[in-house]
Image (cartoon, rainbow, N blue to C red):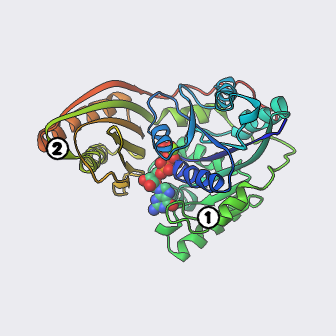
């Protein structure tokens, strides 16, 4: 039986994993390969699953906890994407939760050891998010997150087989070089390149990196699970749905942008650092997505629909260094305000708002 190549694209919340995975999947489809994708989150109702399905890809979802804690669900989800031996994907690209680390010991190695007859496990590719990475690697004060959340950011880079500094289009040559130098100093054995998932700058190099074999390791990375759990728990999580209904047609792009900008402004005022805030708006055949990936960054309309609608279904996914109740109150109050301003009835439903629990991996390869 042919083996399925299993590839994880990791990196912090908002680093550009979904954007990169969409580009990689298109590349492999254009080569005639059969590609399947897997998304993952601590909660349900993922923007990313919809974003990737809207691009026409076959996407399985592992909700409710990270891959390491849901290892069996990950394998089962991949099996669901490969219904019979004649239709096996050539490659499965998986996006772990952006606050997750230790993925080599808890996912890649167990996958290779237990299911090595079915999977050829690729390298752990980690995207560096420059909005926070530039501050964290330079060790500047006021970096946005607490030292425990930064611990996760740095551990993700440490365990990488290769680091891709993403969003190079937003960085000068000098800033790119500074980041590469800082990576070389802190993680001298990990190769790093700069690229942009958005503009596809250096895309061939990103593809080449994903096609490398994974690194054979003498020992697994040392991780303090207490610090890891505390760092993760500092990030408030909120997923919810919003139904939008209006008597007059409204611009879908304007609605998602106003919601992200409004929530972003209130979080700024409350001094709560944003890791990633995204809102998807969908009609039957169109979609729009707005994002904000740090408190000092602007709202990005990453997917424009350019349509007017009388109704739309929205999903909000927010990961913020904030108390979950405060996050819920902010989302509700912004929905109220935007509803009045744009004359759209907005009904917030199915709020899931919490702090992630301590990771309890199903498997963990020993040190
Ligand atoms: N300028 C620029 N923006 C990018 C690039 N890649 C991603 N983005 C933007 O960064 C934001 C986050 O991108 P995603 O692909 O959703 O990031 P992610 O890592 O999947 O985020 P999570 O799933 O929440 O962890 C979006 O607004 C993207 O449009 C890039 O190369 N350049
Ligand atoms: Mg994503």
- Nearest the eye: 269 or 277: 277
Q: Is residue 170 left or right of residue 326?
A: right
Q: Would you place residue 139 above or below residue 239 in this image?
A: below
Q: Quadrant of the C terminus?
A: top right
Q: Would you place residue 240 above or below residue 149 in this image?
A: above
What residue is shown with label 2?
249
Q: Quadrant of the N terminus?
A: top right
Residue 312 is situated, as x and y percent measured from the top left of the image, at 28, 37
Check mark 1 vs ligand 1: CB closer than 8 Å? yes or no: no
Residue 104 is situated, as x and y percent measured from the top left of the image, at 73, 40
Q: Is residue 229 visible?
A: yes
Q: Secondary structure at mark 1?
A: helix
The answer to which image quadrant residue 230 occupies is: top right
Residue 344 is situated, as x and y percent measured from the top left of the image, at 16, 37
- Nearest the eye: 106 or 227: 106
Q: Earlier in the sequence, mark 2 or mark 1?
A: 1
Q: Which mark is residue 203?
A: 1
Task: Point out the residue furthest to the bottom here.
Answer: 173
Q: Residue at x 27, y 44 (%)?
A: 259
Number of other residues with Cα within 10 Å of mark 2, as a class: few under 14, some 14 to 19, many 20 or more:
some
Residue 63 is situated, as x and y percent measured from the top left of the image, at 54, 27
Q: Secondary structure at mark 2?
A: strand
């Amino acid at each position: 039986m042919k083996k399925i190549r299993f590839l994880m694209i990791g990196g912090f919340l908002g680093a550009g994993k979904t954007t990169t995975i969409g580009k990689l999947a298109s590349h492999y489809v254009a080569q005639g390969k059969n590609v399947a994708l897997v998304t993952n989150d601590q909660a349900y109702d993922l923007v990313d699953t919809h974003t990737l399905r809207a691009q026409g890809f076959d996407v399985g979802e592992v909700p409710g906890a990270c891959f390491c804690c849901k290892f069996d669900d990950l394998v089962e989800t991949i099996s669901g994407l490969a219904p019979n031996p004649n239709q096996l994907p050539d490659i499965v690209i998986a996006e772990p939760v952006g606050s997750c680390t230790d993925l080599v010991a808890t996912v890649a190695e167990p996958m290779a050891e237990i299911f090595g007859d079915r999977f050829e496990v690729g390298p752990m590719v980690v995207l560096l998010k420059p909005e926070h990475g530039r501050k964290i690697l330079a060790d500047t004060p006021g970096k946005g997150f607490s030292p425990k959340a930064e611990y996760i950011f740095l551990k993700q880079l440490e365990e990488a087989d290769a680091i891709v500094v993403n969003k190079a289009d937003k960085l000068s040559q000098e800033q790119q070089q500074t980041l590469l130098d800082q990576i070389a100093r802190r993680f001298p054995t990990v190769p790093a390149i700069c690229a942009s998932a958005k503009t596809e700058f250096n895309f061939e190099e990103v593809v080449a990196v994903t096609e490398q074999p994974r690194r054979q390791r003498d020992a697994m990375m040392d991780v303090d699970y207490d610090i890891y759990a505390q760092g993760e728990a500092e990030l408030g999580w909120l997923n919810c749905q919003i139904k939008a209904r209006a008597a007059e047609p409204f611009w879908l792009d304007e609605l998602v942008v106003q919601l992200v900008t409004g929530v972003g402004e209130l979080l700024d005022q409350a001094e709560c650092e944003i890791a990633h805030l995204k809102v998807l708006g969908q009609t039957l055949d169109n979609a729009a997505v707005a994002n904000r990936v740090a408190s000092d960054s602007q709202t990005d309309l990453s997917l424009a629909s350019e349509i007017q609608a009388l109704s739309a279904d929205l999903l909000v996914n927010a990961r913020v260094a904030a108390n979950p109740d405060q996050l819920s109150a902010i989302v509700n109050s912004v929905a109220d305000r935007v509803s009045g301003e744009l004359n759209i009835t907005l009904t917030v439903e199915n709020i899931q708002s919490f702090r992630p629990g301590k990771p309890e991996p199903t498997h963990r390869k020993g040190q």
